[in-house]
Image (spheres, grey):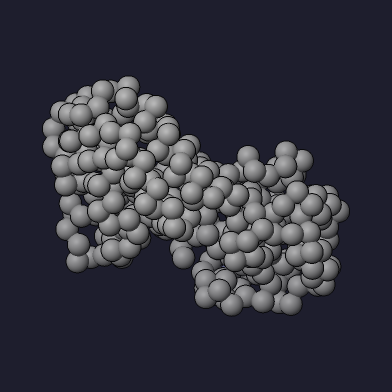
């Protein structure tokens, strides 16, 4: 973790640098952005900046606080995770008790909630109390893809820092550093398919796209415009887990976006083995745009822990058929 990993997002960096200079960090932050956009990197950077003992240029990445945060072993940085399950009021009460105990080594104690939206209503209300009247040495970093899932009263007590999608040009140096052996074309392709999320691009380069050739298969089904084919494709995947389904919807969204570009501007379909070009030939501009909307909306449902994959797939079949027939 270093400041160069916070690529792009210039306004955000300026904000953090100013806060560090004036030692004027807030006591609660909501860090939001899409999957893989760097929320955890930002949380690490912010934690180091808040705990750093240097007088200038915080985080210095040299003092013992910075080094421990970087290694993930600082005793005053606590991660509150329910392993993908809902965070209940009990967990926030435990957190509250812990928050009243003085920090071990640093001047502050930091609580990171990597999936803030998984706090249920009661948990969020307990959190609200803590934000209102918690001890002054406690700092809360709530990470989420969907800040809308947090109560307005919680949001109003936090400083919101949003991570915006990166351009392929902004992302390339970071990808190059991690994958020096890959060609520029491979790096740019991953950057484009990632939708501006560096973490997602790294996953793609690690050969962990999660969805294999499925987006291409989906493109063929769409191009045939058969209700039965669409339904069998979706029904056959009801056992898919939510993360894989989310990755599939993301890849399909990138593929449809590429097909819209091919349709409007012509040129090659470089990344989807001809599937984007096939879609550009088979569907109208408004059918493609409408399908992109559906994929984006369902991707959102998928990230929301309450949506079952069978339900999402049913909506995918029905929504796409409505759009293209
Ligand atoms: Zn430091």
Q: Is residue 156 visible?
A: no
Give percent across and percent down for residue 199. Answer: 40, 57
* Residue in the picture at 36% in, 41% down: 231
User: Residue farthest to the left?
Assistant: 267
Identify which residue, 263 or 64, lies in the foreground: 263
Which quadrant of the figure contains the C terminus?
top left
Write the residue at 48% across / 55% down: 242
Q: Quadrant of residue 252?
A: top left
How many numbered marks appear? 0
Q: Nearer the viewer, residue 181 or 291?
A: 291
Residue 87 pos. (x, y %): 69, 59
In the displayed structure, does residue 73 sit left or right of residue 179? Answer: right
Residue at the front extreme?
228
Tell whether 249 sits left or right of 207.
Answer: right
The percent coordinates of residue 126 (x first, y second) are: 81, 54
The image quadrant of residue 275 is: top left
Q: Position of residue 244 (x, y in %)?
A: 41, 56
Q: Is residue 218 left or right of residue 314?
A: left
Residue 165 can be seen in this image: yes
Residue drawn at 46 percent across, 41 percent down:
314
Depth order, front residue of 242/174: 242
- Whether 310 is drawn above or below 72: the answer is above
Q: Residue at 62% x, 75% y: name it.
A: 74
């Amino acid at each position: 973790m270093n400041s160069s990993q916070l690529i792009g997002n210039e306004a955000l960096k300026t904000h953090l640098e100013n806060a560090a200079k004036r030692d004027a960090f807030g006591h609660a932050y909501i860090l939001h952005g899409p999957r893989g956009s760097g929320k955890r990197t930002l949380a690490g950077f912010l934690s180091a900046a808040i705990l750093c003992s240097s007088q200038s240029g915080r985080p210095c990445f040299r003092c013992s606080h910075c080094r421990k945060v970087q290694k993930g072993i600082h005793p005053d940085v606590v991660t509150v995770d329910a392993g993908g399950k809902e965070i209940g009021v009990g967990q926030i009460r435990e957190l509250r008790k812990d928050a009243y105990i003085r920090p071990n080594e640093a001047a502050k104690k930091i609580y990171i909630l990597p999936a803030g939206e998984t706090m249920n209503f009661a948990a969020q209300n307990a959190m609200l109390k803590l934000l209102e009247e918690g001890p002054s040495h406690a700092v809360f970093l709530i990470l989420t893809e969907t800040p809308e899932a947090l109560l307005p009263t919680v949001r109003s007590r936090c400083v919101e820092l949003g991570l915006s999608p990166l351009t392929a040009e902004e992302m390339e140096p970071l990808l190059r550093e991690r994958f020096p052996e890959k060609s520029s074309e491979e790096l740019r392709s991953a950057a484009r398919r990632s939708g501006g999320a560096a973490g997602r691009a790294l996953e793609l380069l690690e050969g962990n796209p999660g969805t294999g050739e499925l987006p291409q298969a989906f493109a063929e089904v769409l191009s045939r415009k058969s209700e039965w084919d669409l339904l069998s494709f979706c029904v056959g995947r009801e056992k898919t887990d939510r993360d894989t389904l989310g990755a599939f919807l993301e890849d399909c969204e990138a593929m449809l976006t590429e097909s819209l570009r091919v349709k409007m501007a012509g040129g090659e379909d470089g990344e989807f083995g001809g599937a984007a070009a096939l879609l550009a030939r088979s569907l109208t501009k408004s059918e493609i745009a409408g399908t992109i909307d559906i994929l984006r909306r369902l991707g959102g449902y998928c990230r929301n822990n309450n949506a079952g994959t069978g339900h999402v797939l049913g909506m995918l079949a029905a929504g796409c058929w409505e759009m293209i027939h």
